[in-house]
C-alpha cells in the first residue's frame, strides 16, 4: 500500500511546492509593483510588510520541499531497486552514476539555498516597494533588489531540475524544446495559481486585496496563454496520435486533467468578469475572495491529477 500511495503523494507535494515558489517570484516581480501603482502613496509601505510574509511563505515552502526531496529519492529507489543487489550499491549507483541522481543532488542544494535566502529576506526590516511605472514614462522602472534577483534565479533553477526529470526527457525528438516547454508550463502555473494563493493568504484589508488582484489580472492572462500553448505542444509530444487519448490509460488521465483544468479556467474567467468590477465593496471583495479560493482548490486538484499522470507510462511508441 505504501508503495502505491507514497510516489503520487510525493509528486503532488513537489509540484505544489514548486508552483507556490514560482508564485513567490512572480508576486515580487509583477504583482507587488503593480499593486503599489494602484494603491498610490501609501501602497509601497503596506506592500513592504506584505513582502516579508511572502518571503516567509517561500522559506517554509522550500523547507518542506527539502523533506519531499528526501522522499523523492526513496520513491525513485522503489522502482530502481534490484532485490539481488546490496542496497548501498543500488543507492550509490542511482545517486552518483545516473543523470537523475545528478539532477536530484542539484535540486537539493537549490532548495537549501532558497530556504535560507527566503528566510533572510523575511527577517529583515520591511522596506517600501517602488510602484511600477507606465511604459514610456520618463523615469526608469524600479530595480529589483539583488536578493530577489538571486532568489528568482534559484526558483528558475529549481523549475529546471523538475523539467529535467520529467516526461519531457523521454520524448522521441526535440528534447530541449520539450524541457523548455515543461519549465515554461510550470512557471506559468506558478505565476497564475501560486501568485493567487499568496494574494489570498495575506491580510491588509480590502484595498490591498483589490490592488493586488488588479495587478495580478494581466499576469494571469499571459500565464494562461503560456499554459495553454505549452500544454498543447507537450501533450502532442507525449501522446503522438489522437487515438491514444482514449485508447490508453495515459491518454484518458490526460483528458481528465484537461477537463479539470478547464474548470479552473472557467472559475478564473468568472472571477475576472464579475470580481474585478466590485472589489471596492465589502460584499464584492468577499465573494471574489471565495471564488478565488475555489479556483486555487481546483488547481490543487489539477496538480493531483498531474502527479498521477506523471507516474504512468506514456503510450507505446511515444518515447
Image (cartoon, helix red, strand yellow):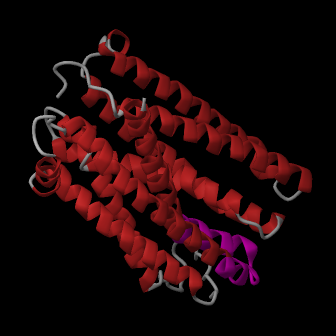
Identity of the residue drawn at 65% across and 81% down: 48
Measured as percent of width and height from the top left, residue 160 is found at: 29, 56
**Quadrant of the drawing holding the N terminus:** top left
In magenta stretch: residue 46:
yes
- Identify which residue, 115 or 240, lies in the foreground: 115
The stretch in magenta equals: 27-49
155 left or right of 49? left
Overall secondary structure of the magenta stretch?
helix
Identity of the residue drawn at 32% across and 27% down: 312
Residue 228 appears anywhere in the view: no
Identity of the residue drawn at 67% across and 69% down: 35
- Identify which residue, 23 or 266, lies in the foreground: 23
- Identify which residue, 165 or 77, lies in the foreground: 77
Place residue 255 in its image quadrant: top left
64 left or right of 110? right
Place residue 267 in its image quadrant: top right
Identity of the residue drawn at 78% across and 70% down: 204
Amino acid at each position: 500500500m505504501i508503495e502505491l500511495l507514497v510516489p503520487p503523494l510525493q509528486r503532488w507535494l513537489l509540484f505544489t511546492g514548486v508552483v507556490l515558489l514560482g508564485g513567490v517570484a512572480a508576486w515580487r516581480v509583477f504583482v507587488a509593483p503593480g499593486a503599489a501603482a494602484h494603491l498610490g502613496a501609501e501602497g509601497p509601505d503596506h506592500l513592504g510588510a506584505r513582502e516579508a510574509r511572502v518571503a516567509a511563505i517561500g522559506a517554509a515552502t522550500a523547507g518542506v520541499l527539502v523533506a519531499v526531496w528526501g522522499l523523492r529519492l526513496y520513491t525513485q529507489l522503489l522502482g530502481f531497486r534490484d532485490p539481488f543487489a546490496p542496497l548501498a550499491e543500488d543507492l550509490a549507483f542511482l545517486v552518483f552514476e545516473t543523470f537523475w541522481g545528478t539532477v536530484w543532488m542539484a535540486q537539493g542544494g537549490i532548495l537549501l539555498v532558497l530556504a535560507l535566502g527566503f528566510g533572510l529576506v523575511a527577517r529583515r526590516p520591511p522596506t517600501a516597494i517602488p510602484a511600477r511605472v507606465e511604459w514610456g514614462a520618463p523615469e526608469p522602472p524600479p530595480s529589483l533588489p539583488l536578493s530577489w534577483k538571486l532568489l528568482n534565479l534559484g526558483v528558475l533553477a529549481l523549475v529546471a531540475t523538475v523539467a529535467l526529470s520529467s516526461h519531457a526527457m523521454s520524448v522521441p525528438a526535440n528534447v530541449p524544446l520539450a524541457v523548455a516547454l515543461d519549465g515554461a508550463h510550470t512557471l506559468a502555473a506558478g505565476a497564475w495559481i501560486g501568485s493567487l494563493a499568496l494574494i489570498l493568504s495575506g491580510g491588509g484589508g480590502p484595498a490591498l486585496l483589490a490592488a493586488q488582484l488588479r495587478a495580478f489580472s494581466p499576469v494571469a492572462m499571459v500565464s494562461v496563454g503560456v499554459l495553454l500553448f505549452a500544454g498543447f505542444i507537450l501533450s502532442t509530444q507525449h501522446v503522438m496520435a489522437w487515438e491514444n487519448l482514449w485508447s490508453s490509460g495515459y491518454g484518458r488521465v490526460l483528458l481528465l486533467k484537461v477537463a479539470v483544468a478547464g474548470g479552473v479556467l472557467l472559475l478564473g474567467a468568472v472571477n475576472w468578469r464579475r470580481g474585478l468590477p466590485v472589489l471596492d465593496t465589502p460584499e464584492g471583495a468577499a465573494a471574489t475572495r471565495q471564488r478565488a479560493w475555489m479556483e486555487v482548490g481546483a488547481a490543487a486538484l489539477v496538480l493531483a491529477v498531474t502527479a498521477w499522470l506523471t507516474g504512468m507510462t506514456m503510450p507505446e511508441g511515444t518515447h
